[in-house]
Image (cartoon, rainbow, N blue to C red):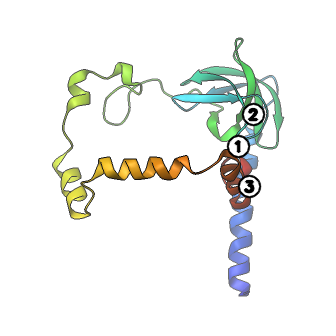
Amino acid sequence: MNPLASLRAALALLASLGATLAALAAFEVGGAAYTKRLETVVRAEPRALAAAAGKLGYARKLKVLEVRDGWLRVSDGNVTGWVFAGNLSDEKPSEGKGADGLGFAASETTATAAARPLAPAAVDYAAGRNLGSAREDLDWLLAQGARVTPEQVEAFLQAQKKGEYQ
């Protein structure tokens, strides 16, 4: 293997490890963490495909009960379980509106805003790249996804050191 390529790979690995450690360092047992996804799945075990123990909404304050291998055991008083540290923040996220000025949740979006057509630039982009057959593309994607098992997903994440396996 090329020494320069080996050095680059080692640096990339160190950077990834450093980012994960920095994220974990922000959380302390007994401290607070906040959900940063519209819906955060709380797992029964610290594994990506473990059974769900519950779901939490955006910007929910959680108490950190334990920190282990990139996972935090948390509780909001009603739900207790494990969440991957990358899905949490040590600071409360903004509960305002997205960059488009609309609310984050679909329930906060007006029917007028939801029904607006695509911007002309988006239509031109799709037409220029032959992306006009969304229904067929979605059907194909769903069929392909149905063939993938949870075990295959977990094996891929582990092998590629993605998501919760970083």
**Label 3 neighbourhood size at 10 Å, few (<14), some (14-19), many (20+)?**
some
Q: Would you say 52 lies left or right of 101 here? A: right
Per the rendering, the mark at residue 27 is: 2
Name the outermost residue toward the left. 120
Q: Considering the image in quadrants, where does the N terminus appear? A: bottom right
Amino acid identity at mark 1: Ala
150 or 60: nearer the eye?
Answer: 150
Counting other residues with Cα less than 10 Å from the Cα at mark 1, is it few (<14), some (14-19), or many (20 or more)? some
| Nearer to me, 120 or 18 | 120
From the viewer's perspective, tell me whether residue 96 is left or right of residue 156. left
Could you tell me residue 115's position as x and y percent?
21, 30
Q: Residues within 10 Å of mark 2 (few under 14, many from 20)?
A: many
Residue 158 numbered tag: 3
Do residues under tags 3 and 1 come within 8 Å of each other at their CB atoms? no
Helix, strand or loop under label 3: helix
- Are the residues flagged by discs 2 and 1 in contact, CB closer than 8 Å? yes
**Up/down of 41 relative to 18, above or below:** above
Left or right position of 60 against 126: right
Under mark 2, the amino acid is: Phe
Q: Earlier in the sequence, mark 3 or mark 1?
A: 1
Residue labelled with disc 1: 23
In terms of sequence position, does the residue under pointer 3 or pointer 2 come before the other? Answer: 2
Residue 164: % across, % down? 70, 46
Residue 147 image point, x, y percent: 57, 51
- Distance between the Cα atoms at labels 2 and 1? 7 Å
